[in-house]
């Protein structure tokens, strides 16, 4: 059975004396100097650095709304209890939309925790290998938090050390500078982290996760050769391969598998460390589901005939649905998401599911490789990783002989469009699509209400603008 060291460490922190330090805003130098002096402090602190990543109700982590609901894959459902989700869906969000304020605070909380670790862990008297691992985890996590912030807000303040309260009113740093720092952090993390762990430490950042985040950041920079260089290092580890069954990436019993490059852990302990997507996305006809995201017809139509990934991603009329049979009345569109949901027999509380969120899947790494090769004009080579992803899906089709024929075009434009299509159907509802549309320059064509020059990023929270006169709001807000 999957061990839960990281999650249990987070739980213990919630009730420990460290709470007063970790939750204090801002974390000043005096507080930092009183903490992280022993190896026991170090393990608690590094475990806590993962806490803001979780999709639980306590975190109010609505990153998924930015990646999914803002795109053309979903529309808002629910009962109107979260008006911010409606604003994000309809592109009417403002600096006062609550979800942006929550997300800003959550990620900077993670960054402060990482900075604490980066500064203090090297001074702790403990096993050198373990100390280096904890430092690598902190560097990777800081890089990941900053990557999310640049996706959502664009330029943001960058702090790489612990700061006193009078030093916190920083101006925004260009996302290009932050991306460079992310790559530096990932390279250092990769030099310190192991390629894999025992089951006891499943979910900790690995060398492959750090190299993959460097690859993704390079892709965002449009540095395609550098993207390929990092991917070659990931593949050279010999750790990752696609699961034969696509759905094994979204089953409780088959998590942390060979396709998982980095997976954010959740568990059904009824302690607030479960995955609330199980409630947020479940139909209102399914127990205590909120139905906050409903699949569009446009997204359903993106799937090719016979593509088995459709049934693993979208519920349509008469499909099995976690002990029920899906009916069109289950959502306003007639369709609903399937990923990250569980039956009530598996998760004893709807808001406390234990399906992990795989932030980086090896299938996505292969599609980054295909995209980078195609962008460089290496179209024949790009067909190889693209086919690896399609072949796995084809093998699960009812009729593999006719489903999902191999892509053979070497025309650069046609191939890039085919790779973009493949990302959409392979990674649906995995929180990437809105950001893909932005970096491809397609959002204005695909998203109703999208205003070019404004909606490529979301607004900085108004409360942060009020507290920090050095901040300048994104254009249009």
Image (tube, rainbow, N blue to C red):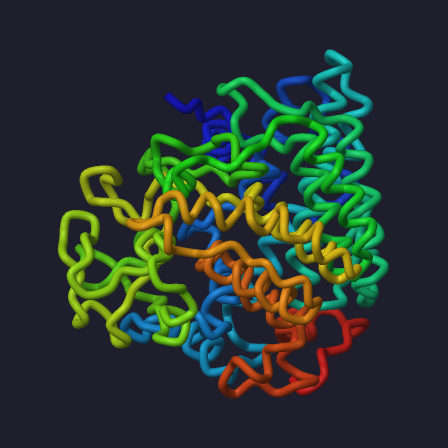
Judging depth in this view, the residue of 124 and 323 nearest the camera is 323
Q: Residue at image x 61%, y 23%?
A: 196
Looking at the rendering, in which quadrant would you find the N terminus? top left
Question: Left or right of 242: which side holds 334?
Answer: left
Q: Residue at image x 52%, y 59%?
A: 422
Looking at the rendering, in which quadrant would you find the C terminus? bottom right
Q: Residue at image x 56%, y 81%?
A: 94
Snapshot quadrant of residue 468 = bottom right
Q: Total marks drawn?
A: 0
289 is higher (above) or lower (below) than 437: above
Residue 112 makes an appearance in the image? no
Question: Left or right of 295: which side holds 14?
Answer: right
429 is higher (above) or lower (below) than 247: below
Q: Position of residue 308 (x, y in %)?
A: 35, 52
474 is higher (above) or lower (below) than 387: below
Judging depth in this view, the residue of 179 and 250 nearest the camera is 250
Residue 75 makes an appearance in the image? yes
Q: Position of residue 51 (x, y in %)?
A: 54, 41
Snapshot quadrant of residue 154 = bottom right
Q: Position of residue 18 (x, y in %)?
A: 58, 33
Q: Position of residue 235 (x, y in %)?
A: 68, 34
Judging depth in this view, the residue of 421 and 361 nearest the camera is 421
């Amino acid at each position: 059975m999957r061990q839960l060291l990281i999650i249990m460490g987070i739980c213990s922190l919630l009730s420990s004396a460290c709470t007063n330090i970790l939750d204090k805003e801002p974390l000043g130098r005096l507080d930092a100097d009183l903490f992280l002096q022993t190896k026991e402090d170090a393990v608690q602190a590094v475990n806590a650095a993962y806490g803001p990543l979780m999709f639980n109700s306590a975190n109010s982590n609505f990153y998924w709304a930015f990646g999914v609901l803002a795109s053309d894959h979903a529309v808002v459902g629910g009962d109107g209890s979260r008006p911010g989700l409606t604003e994000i869906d309809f592109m009417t969000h403002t600096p006062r939309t609550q979800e942006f304020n929550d997300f800003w605070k959550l990620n900077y909380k993670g960054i402060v925790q990482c900075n604490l670790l980066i500064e203090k862990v090297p001074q702790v008297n403990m096993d050198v290998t373990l100390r280096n691992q904890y430092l690598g985890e902190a560097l990777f996590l800081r890089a990941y938090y900053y990557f999310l912030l640049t996706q959502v807000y664009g330029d943001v303040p960058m702090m790489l050390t612990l700061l006193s309260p009078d030093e916190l009113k920083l101006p925004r740093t260009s996302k290009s500078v932050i991306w460079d720092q992310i790559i530096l952090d990932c390279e250092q993390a990769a030099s310190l982290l192991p390629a894999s762990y025992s089951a006891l430490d499943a979910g900790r950042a690995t060398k492959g996760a750090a190299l993959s985040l460097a690859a993704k950041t390079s892709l965002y920079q449009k540095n395609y050769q550098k993207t390929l260089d990092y991917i070659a290092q990931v593949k050279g580890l010999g750790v990752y391969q696609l699961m034969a069954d696509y759905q094994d990436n979204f089953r409780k019993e088959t998590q942390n598998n060979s396709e998982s490059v980095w997976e954010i852990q959740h568990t059904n302990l009824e302690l607030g460390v479960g995955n609330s997507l199980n409630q947020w996305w479940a139909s209102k006809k399914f127990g205590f589901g909120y139905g906050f995201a409903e699949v569009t017809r446009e997204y359903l139509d993106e799937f090719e005939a016979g593509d088995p990934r459709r049934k693993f991603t979208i519920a349509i009329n008469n499909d099995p649905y976690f002990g029920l049979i899906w009916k069109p009345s289950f959502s306003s569109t007639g369709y609903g998401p399937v990923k990250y949901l569980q039956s009530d027999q598996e998760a004893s509380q709807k808001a406390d599911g234990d399906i992990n969120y795989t932030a980086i899947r090896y299938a996505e790494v292969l599609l980054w490789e295909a995209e980078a090769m195609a962008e460089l004009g290496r179209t024949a080579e790009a067909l190889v990783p693209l086919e690896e992803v399609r072949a796995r899906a084809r093998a699960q089709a009812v009729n593999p002989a006719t489903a999902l024929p191999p892509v053979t075009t070497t025309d650069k434009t046609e191939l890039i469009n085919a790779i973009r299509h493949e990302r959409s159907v392979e990674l649906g509802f995995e929180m990437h699509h809105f950001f893909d549309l932005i970096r491809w320059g397609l959002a204005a064509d695909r998203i109703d209400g999208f205003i070019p020059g404004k909606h490529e990023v979301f607004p900085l929270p108004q409360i942060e603008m009020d507290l920090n006169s050095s901040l300048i709001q994104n254009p249009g807000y």
